[in-house]
Amino acid sequence: MAIHTRLTERLNIEHPILNAPMGGAAGGRLAAAVTAAGGLGLIGGGSSDAQWLTHEFAEAGNARVGCGFITWALATRPAVLDVALAHAPVAVMLSFGDPRPFAPAIKAAGRLLICQVQDMRHADAALDVGADIIVAQGTEAGGHGARRATLTLVPEIADLLAQRSPDTLLVAAGGIADGRGLAAALMLGADGVLVGSRMWASPEALVHRNLQDAALANDGDATLRQSAGDIARGAAWPAEFTGRVLRNSFTDRWAGKEDALRAVAEELRPAYLQSVADADADRIAVYVGEAIGLMDALVPAGDSIRAMAAQAEELLMSRAARAER
Amino acid sequence: MAIHTRLTERLNIEHPILNAPMGGAAGGRLAAAVTAAGGLGLIGGGSSDAQWLTHEFAEAGNARVGCGFITWALATRPAVLDVALAHAPVAVMLSFGDPRPFAPAIKAAGRLLICQVQDMRHADAALDVGADIIVAQGTEAGGHGARRATLTLVPEIADLLAQRSPDTLLVAAGGIADGRGLAAALMLGADGVLVGSRMWASPEALVHRNLQDAALANDGDATLRQSAGDIARGAAWPAEFTGRVLRNSFTDRWAGKEDALRAVAEELRPAYLQSVADADADRIAVYVGEAIGLMDALVPAGDSIRAMAAQAEELLMSRAARAER
């Protein structure tokens, strides 16, 4: 028994679960583990570094995986898309920016085009470029995102797809870390889910244990959206996309004071980058979502995928039985 | 057939659905309509005005209803609680503030105590005062609330209750306007839902048609959290509780510029209150949630309740059938 959806059929996978292609964190080892467990693994080509990407595709071995890009960053190094396509990814996901410059090449290469969106305007843009799959990402997600919540964004986009493009699949992202979230997403009209924080807190993720331990020690109240981390690092994120991070000394000092930080960021950058290198979880932006409140230990990615699917299936069956009484 | 949960049993109702006791908007007529449709109606005693409350209990007639208070406002007129208790409400809901001064009287009167919470700290406080039911309200909710999203807050509080107080019931609020949201909430571990915006956009709500029409004409992207409306009106809301409102000329001018507004609020107040009296949907804070994107027409409250229950039941049954293949 398993949960069959249009997503499992279209991707030819066992469980309707993808990992978020978290830039720098979702390498080939994580993607391969997700695929091996029955989901679809996505390598996070966030930084658009060709050498890194080539290395991570190699780390994935022969696993059937896809990859994802930060669209505005890819626009600064567009040739990296060709590097990805040369590896024949199952799918290419574009997030955070205008998909128009890249969608044609992805589709021409015969790859599935996944567009991650944060609001209705983005969803329209994704349909305009012929996205095969739309990932609706809510504000509870870790890392970069925007303002809409998963619980309303998913059904609202489901209604849009029903009207405008019924064959486009829908995946829910943001706040989903266990089978409850998966089952809820299916009820909202999603065909599957994309999971970030739960995959980030796995031994396969390219994340320092210090950061994982700091996140796992906290509950879900301990995150907030800010742009201070991007300013400190010198990353040119568009203003509409803030990053959800763990509350710590860094955010106490700078979150909400982004303008003040901007004035001194260059001066502070060497120290900030040293703290990044040191994996000092108190002094840097630690990108995780509200779902850390649903997690208390590092778990191998494959174990999480299988547990999510089993729990969701059990919930769907038992709740239906109760509805029937 | 119907959806049976611990909430329907405890409240002796047919559908696990409560209306949000929206201050000023959820009067006796709305509460009675919700109860008549098989949910539990709650009168919104937000402003803590004894005369208004007495009038609205009369409007509810013989319907079995409860009522809700804005806790910090009730603290300024604590005697209004006695007015409510004299009407033998099924339950009294406390939101936004310290429940300790009021919980003992509610429980001593034999009424169910409902505490609405916005984060884990609030949930602990609700358990400390012996709440019978906790409403976990996510940031996608209309009107006042805080930062956590429904999708993560509900399961995290479910885990807390399982550990600390298994007999306390859990209700999800924020972003729920149809059967998809109800079914999702049940998957997340809730025993039922509390519905604001969908009830606000009903003919029974004490809301001017101008405001309802303005909200219904927009999608879910068109709301934001702010405190400008409270400052303009002169309401002393604690800083942690912002209000989700419709984006309009008022929020374009003042949302995010609350400090500047504070400096001129007294001067602008007469004009603002005149706009409130005129129900000018472009010049005042219009308190609605992201769920407006799931609604396109004014619907009688009872019809919405019945449709939500039927849709949720159908989803639970059909998804389970598909999981079984």
Image: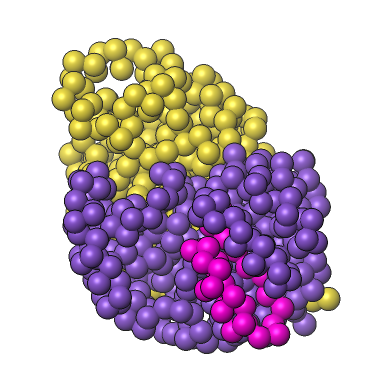
Chain colours: A purple, B yellow
**Could you tell me if residue B61 is visible in this image?**
no
In percent of the image, x 28 and y 68: which residue is there? Answer: A273
Residue B73 at x, y percent in the picture? 24, 40
Please determine whether, in this image, residue B35 is positioned above or below residue B132: above
The magenta span reads A44-71
Residue A79 location, quadrant: bottom right
In percent of the image, x 23 and y 53: which residue is there? Answer: A265
Please determine whether, in this image, residue A88 is positioned above or below residue B18: below
Instruction: Using residue A42 as the reference point, say whether residue A227 is left or right of it.
Output: left
Residue A18 location, quadrant: bottom right
Point out the residue furthest to the right here.
B325
Residue B216 at x, y percent in the picture? 58, 29
Q: Nearer the viewer, residue A204 or B2?
A: A204
Please determine whether, in this image, residue A176 is positioned above or below residue B297: below
Please determine whether, in this image, residue A296 is positioned above or below residue B19: below
Residue A232 location, quadrant: bottom left
**Could you tell me if residue A80 is visible in this image?**
yes
- Residue A239 sits inside the magenta stretch: no
- Residue A47 sits inside the magenta stretch: yes
Q: Nearer the viewer, residue B247 or B40?
A: B247
Instruction: Using residue A325 as the reference point, say whether residue B115 is left or right of it.
Output: left
In percent of the image, x 47 and y 53: which residue is there? Answer: A145
In percent of the image, x 58 and y 35: which residue is there? Answer: B219
Report how many numbered discs are placed on residues in the image: 0
Check the picture and name the quadrant holding the N terminus of chain A.
Answer: bottom right
